[in-house]
Amino acid sequence: MPSSAALTVESLGFVVGGAPILHDVDLEVAPGEMIGVIGPNGAGKTTLFNMISGIHAPTTGRVLLDGRDITHQPVHRRALAGLGRTFQTSNLFPGLSVLENVRLAAQRRLGGNLSVLRFPRRSDRASTVAMEHLDEVGLAGLADVLAGGLSHGDKRKLEIAVLLAMQPGVILLDEPMAGVARADVPGLSEVIRRMHRDHHSTVLMVEHHIDVVMGLVERVAVLHQGTILALDEPDRIMADPLVQSAYLGAPV
Ligand SMILES: Nc1ncnc2c1ncn2[C@@H]1O[C@H](COP(=O)(O)OP(=O)(O)O)[C@@H](O)[C@H]1O
Ligand SMILES: [Mg+2]
């Protein structure tokens, strides 16, 4: 029977030099659902994202987007099919303005001329769309600032505006709070919450700030030694003795 999940990971495995990095990973993310992925360093979280987004090919298993097998599609084809991601480290154009970063993404989607040299006219369609997304993430006031000059927290917000401009159905966020000042964490969480709510985006988010994850997501997947140890609602994950001993370090 075909799955109605927005994103399906089936029996995924990844072996490098005989060592299993991931094994038997099964995950179904429902349309509009946000799932948090937690687990200790080296558990395989980023590798899982790399398999889903097509940076590395899995050794075994399949990845389905809206029920379509994308396991062997290159990164750009997956992006066109509606898969968007952010990276653990930023991939913005630091020498371009905040607006220009979003405008380029909007223009790519709207199918326009991909010129960075042309001075952006505020009146063009891509610029209008870009300003709307900047407004959504609270950066409209910084539209003309160079992206490279933003704080870490604002860079993350800008990455989300860039993602929104590409209108992906499924979004992968790899440690969106990494490097962000503690004081900026609540504001960034709120931007992610609104993105999920207002765009009904399906989101898979790796994040080390457990309190942030637990407050945002519908379900939490615990990745441990390359496989999913538990997948449940946040309260139940926090209360799970297996999770506590394996991940949170508390006695069972
Ligand atoms: N392409 C690769 N080649 C070799 N080892 C890799 C590769 N990708 C990941 N690894 C290893 O896989 C393990 C999981 O890494 P990673 O997915 O980055 O973990 P996490 O994001 O959970 O901290 C680590 O031990 C890492 O060194
Ligand atoms: Mg990682």
Image (cartoon, rainbow, N blue to C red):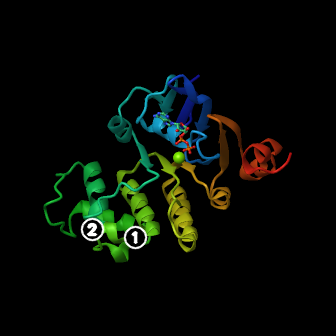
Residue extending farthest to the left is 118
Give the percent coordinates (x, y) of residue 215. Answer: 66, 60
Q: Position of residue 202 (x, y in %)?
A: 53, 47
Query: Which is nearer the eye, 213 or 110?
Result: 213
Q: CA distance from mark 2 to mark 1?
A: 15 Å
Q: Secondary structure at mark 1?
A: helix
Tell me the element at label 2.
loop
Q: Residues within 10 Å of mark 2 (few under 14, many from 20)?
A: some
Give the quarter of the figure containing the C terminus.
Answer: top right
Q: Which residue is mark 2?
A: 97
> Which image quarter: residue 139?
bottom left
* Farthest residue, direction bottom: 141
Q: Residue furthest front?
A: 17
Q: Residues within 10 Å of mark 1 (few under 14, many from 20)?
A: some
At 16% from the left and 52% from the top, the residue drawn is: 113
Tell me which label, 2 or 1, sits earlier in the chain: 2
Question: Which residue is located at x 50 percent, y 23 percent?
Answer: 59
Q: Considering only vertical position in the picture, is 91 above or below 122?
A: above
Please provide percent x and percent y for residue 45: 56, 42
Does residue 72 appear left or right of residue 114 in this picture? right
Q: Is residue 114 visible?
A: yes
Kind of residue at disc 2 = Ser
Task: Identify the amino acid type marked 1.
Answer: Asp
Q: Is residue 99 left or right of residue 27?
A: left
Q: Quadrant of the N terminus?
A: top right
> Quick check: can you spot residue 137?
no
Give yes or no for contact between labels 2 and 1 (Cβ–Cβ under 8 Å): no
Seen at 67% across and 43% down, the residue is 222
Q: Nearer the viewer, residue 238 or 121?
A: 238
For mark 1, what is the residue?
135
Ligand 2 closer than 8 Å to label 1 CB: no
Q: Quadrant of residue 79?
A: top left
